[in-house]
Amino acid sequence: MIDFGKFMYEKKKKEKEAKKKQHTMQVKELRFRPNTDDHDLEFKTRHARGFLEDGDKVKATVQFRGRDMLYTEKGEELLHNLADELSDISQIESKPTMEGRRMIMILTPSKNS
């Protein structure tokens, strides 16, 4: 026979310790415009690399305003370039898709990293 109160205390203590050690995956968002400059793209790519190395997902968004809607292929090219730069540590969860005036792509950390 064991003390049930002591058993429950030990069980809760173990659960609390396990919860401390787990990492919840967050979604970090990066926003671009279709005419984003190369340097700005490199800067944001470094941020995305850090997020992916920490185990978070990255949601890359290209925002189109006004006449920018004419350059949707430019935005898609920008997202593909981002995915190529990060292909060593990530994989594409969802390909670039238009949602209203935004084009969205989601990257997740690779299993092998």
Image (cartoon, rainbow, N blue to C red):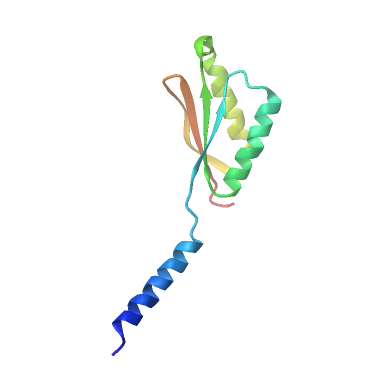
Q: Percent from the top left, x then y, of residue 14?
A: 42, 72
Above or below, 88 against 33 in this view is below
Q: Nearer the viewer, residue 11 or 104?
A: 11
Above or below, 18 relative to 10:
above
Q: Quadrant of residue 76?
A: top right
Is 98 displayed left or right of 39 in the figure? left
Location of residue 64 in the rendering, given as x and y in whole percent from the top left corner: 51, 18
The residue depicted at 57 percent of the width and 28 percent of the height is: 80
Which x, y percent locates residue 89? 60, 45
Q: Residue at x 48, y 49 (%)?
A: 25
Q: Is residue 95 left or right of 44 when viewed as pictured?
A: left
Q: Is residue 25 visible?
A: yes
Q: Tell me if residue 56 comes above or below residue 97 in the rendering.
A: below
Image quadrant containing the N terminus: bottom left
Look at the picture and state if 46 lies above or below 69. Answer: below
Residue at (42% x, 72% y) in the render: 13
Residue 79, picture quadrant = top right
